[in-house]
Image (cartoon, rainbow, N blue to C red):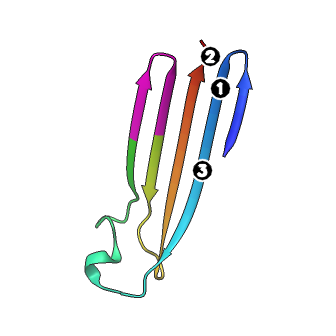
């Protein structure tokens, strides 16, 4: 996690990555998407003086491993 504060703005960012290793090769769980593309989901939140966003990306399984990324960012203004 990184935090930066300058001229009344505070920015916090986070990036996490995981490798999920599957021991079960069941076809129902083999690919999160049938077309081979990553699945991307995001959420955002805002209120006066602050905003936050997060994105989760799940990549299709490759050789028994599935890569997952989480990226989050928040920006707030000192009142």
* Relative to 35, 79 lies left or right: right
Q: Which residue is mark 3?
A: 15
* Residue 48 falls left or right of residue 26: right
Q: Are marks 1 and 2 in contact (CB under 8 Å)?
A: yes
Residue 42, percent across and down?
39, 43
Picture residue at 64% right of the left edge, 30% below the top: 11
- The residue closer to the viewer here, 38 or 5, is 5
Report which residue position mark 1 lands on.
10
- Which stretch did the figure color magenta? 43-53
Residue at the location (53% across, 71% down)? 19
Name, please, the residue furthest toward the top.
79
The first of marks 3 and 1 along the sequence is 1
Q: Residue furthest left?
A: 28
Secondary structure state at the residue bearing disc 2: loop
On-image quarter of the C terminus = top right
**Above or below — where is 32 with respect to 43?**
below
Q: Separation of disc 2 and disc 3 at Cα?
A: 24 Å
Q: Which mark is residue 78?
A: 2
């Amino acid at each position: 996690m990184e935090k930066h504060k300058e001229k009344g703005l505070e920015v916090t960012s986070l990036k996490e990555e995981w490798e999920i290793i599957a021991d079960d090769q069941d076809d129902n769980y083999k690919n999160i998407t049938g077309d081979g593309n990553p699945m991307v989901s995001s959420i955002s939140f805002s209120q006066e003086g602050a905003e936050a966003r997060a994105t989760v990306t799940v990549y299709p399984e490759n050789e028994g491993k599935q890569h997952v990324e989480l990226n989050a960012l928040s920006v707030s203004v000192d009142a």
